[in-house]
Image (cartoon, rainbow, N blue to C red):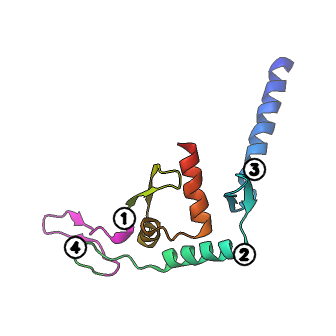
Amino acid sequence: MKMLQQPLRLAVLGVLALGLLASAHAQRVVRDAVTGQLRPLTATEAKQLEDLDRAMRNRVPRGLLTGTPNPQPVRMPDGSDFLESTDADLNYSVVVRSPSGRLVHTCVSNPEIAERMARGKLPAFARNYMERLNDER
């Protein structure tokens, strides 16, 4: 019986440790373009990221067919329900050419970020992300 208790204690400790790790505060980091090491965001990068987050949260979804802001479900005469898809349901596939000449493909859910990526006008944190994608492939 004692032989079974030791692995059980270790398993309980492992579960507790995972719980503590999951509740730890998250930190946003970027991969440094020069060294390749992870580093904390600069104040400018953090502000750019916060502005993008705020813009995404404040967007009101519009119906793709009618353009109605925040469309509501409609009960049809046959009893079925219809909900118009919105622009919030879309994903944008973007392919850009990296500095090394390779094509890098990624999907994003924000049309503004997709447009910036296509035009090459990305904030620093997003450029680092794209460089990391390029390095991994």
> As rendered, which of 105 and 55 lies closer to the eye?
105
Type of amino acid under label 4:
Leu
**Label 3, label 4: how many angstroms apart (C-alpha)?**
45 Å
At x 80%, y 25%, the residue is 7
Look at mark 3 in the image and give the residue it sits on. 21
Say whether disc 3 or disc 4 marks the residue closer to the N-terminus: 3
Say whether disc 4 or disc 1 marks the residue closer to the N-terminus: 4
At x 33%, y 81%, the residue is 69
Look at mark 2 in the image and give the residue it sits on. 43
Mark 2 or 3, which is nearer the eye? 2
**Label 2, label 4: how many angstroms apart (C-alpha)?**
41 Å
What secondary structure is found at the residue carrying circle 3? helix
User: In x, y percent, where is residue 28?
Assistant: 69, 62
> As rendered, which of 116 and 85 lies closer to the eye?
116
Mark 3 or 1, which is nearer the eye? 1
Can you tell which quarter of the image residue 16 is in?
top right
Q: Are marks 1 and 2 in contact (CB under 8 Å)?
A: no
**Label 4, label 1: how many angstroms apart (C-alpha)?**
13 Å
- Residue extent of the magenta highlight: 69-88
Look at mark 1 in the image and give the residue it sits on. 89
User: In x, y percent, where is residue 109?
Assistant: 43, 64
Is residue 74 in the magenta section? yes
Type of amino acid under label 1:
Asp
User: In x, y percent, where is residue 123?
Assistant: 58, 70
Mark 3 or 4, which is nearer the eye? 4
Look at mark 4 in the image and give the residue it sits on. 65
What secondary structure is found at the residue carrying circle 4? loop
Q: Are marks 3 and 4 in contact (CB under 8 Å)?
A: no
Q: Residues within 10 Å of mark 4 (few under 14, many from 20)?
A: few
Type of amino acid under label 3:
Leu
